[in-house]
Amino acid sequence: MIIKKYAKPIILIMCVAVMVYALISMSEGRGPVKYQEHLQDTAVTIDGEDVTFEDLAFYILFEEEKVEEQAKIYNSDYTKDYWNLHTNDTFIQEEAKDVVMGMAIHDHLFYQLAVEEGLDKLDAKEEEDLKYRQTDFWEDLLDIQWEKLPCDEETINEQIRIAAIAEKYQNKLADKEGPSRAAYKYDGYYYSLIKDEHDIKINKKLWDKFVLGDVTLKHSKINYINGLTNEDKEKSKEKEGN
């Protein structure tokens, strides 16, 4: 009788404990991932070849710098506001994230095709242009990005080289087939047709948890009145007080 008396409460407690554990596990699994902890994990596979998260470093640095500069114009006091802005049915952060993956897939796919066709070499003029491109990239980086550099400069310079070779292949293809070089860029229509012919698999399990804007940047403040600077808010308070 005693066993029966306490059996239901014990079972109930055990069920609750299991549910709490499951919720905690689900919560931890759904949280954002730290980019630096997944450098060697596969971000996307293109025709059987893995592209790691580290291989995306150049694109992440480039896009975060570009968007952050736009964010400073929007609200220099709280740049995170711009990243969280919802426009064109999506958030700026998600749109920028799509650009990173889109550029990376484009360049690695075209680089693979260039290697297959023996077009993966740069001539003297192209090497000189590459040096300028690399120099411009490093000069444009924000101070905080230097502090939070995800990998060494040599690795990133090699990624810029891959992008240059991909662009060379893209331009030769456009000049041969038409209609324009823009049509073969990462967001071009003719490129999308080529892309559809290849096996591309994004590691969505990790990629979906990755937050662009917080990898090589630091946002310590979020303004809950989007678009207002400190000066604007002070003026707003003064008006409310009158």
Image (cartoon, rainbow, N blue to C red):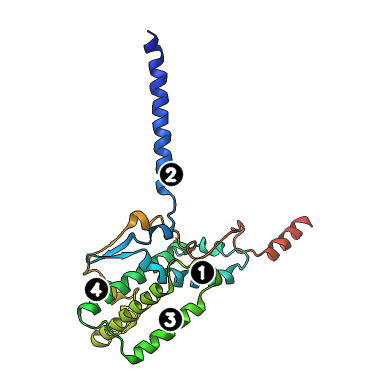
Label 4 close to label 2 by CB (< 8 Å): no
Q: Residue furthest top?
A: 1
Give the mark toward the camera: 4 or 2: 2
Q: Which residue is mark 2?
A: 27
**185, above or below 49, in the image:** below
Residue that numbered label 1 is attached to: 145
Question: What is the count of numbered marks?
Answer: 4
Question: Residue 2: x percent and y percent?
Answer: 40, 9
Looking at the image, which residue is at 31% across and 81% down? 165
241 or 152, nearer to the observer: 152
Upstream in the sequence, badge 1 or badge 4? 1
Dot 3 or dot 1, earlier in sequence: 3
Label 2 is placed on what type of residue?
Answer: Ser
Residue at 58% from the left image edge and 72% from the top image edge: 73
SS category of the residue bearing label 4: helix
List the single residue furthest toward the bottom.
125
N-terminal of the two: label 4 or label 2? 2
Labels 3 & 1 near each other (Cβ < 8 A): no
Alpha carbon of mark 1 to alpha carbon of mark 4: how far? Answer: 34 Å
Q: Is residue 79 above or below residue 168?
A: above
**Residue 182 figure quarter:** bottom left
Q: Position of residue 143 (x, y in %)?
A: 55, 71
Asked if the residues shown at circle 2 and circle 3 are in contact, with their CB atoms under 8 angstroms apart, the answer is: no
Mark sitting earlier along the chain (2/3): 2
Q: In this image, 230 relative to 51: left or right?
A: right
Q: Are marks 1 and 2 in contact (CB under 8 Å)?
A: no
Residue at image mark 3: 134
Amino acid at pointer 1? Gln
Residue at which label 4 appears:
194
Kindly report the distance in space between the C-alpha atoms of the residues bearing marks 2 and 3.
Answer: 41 Å
Amino acid bearing label 3? Gln
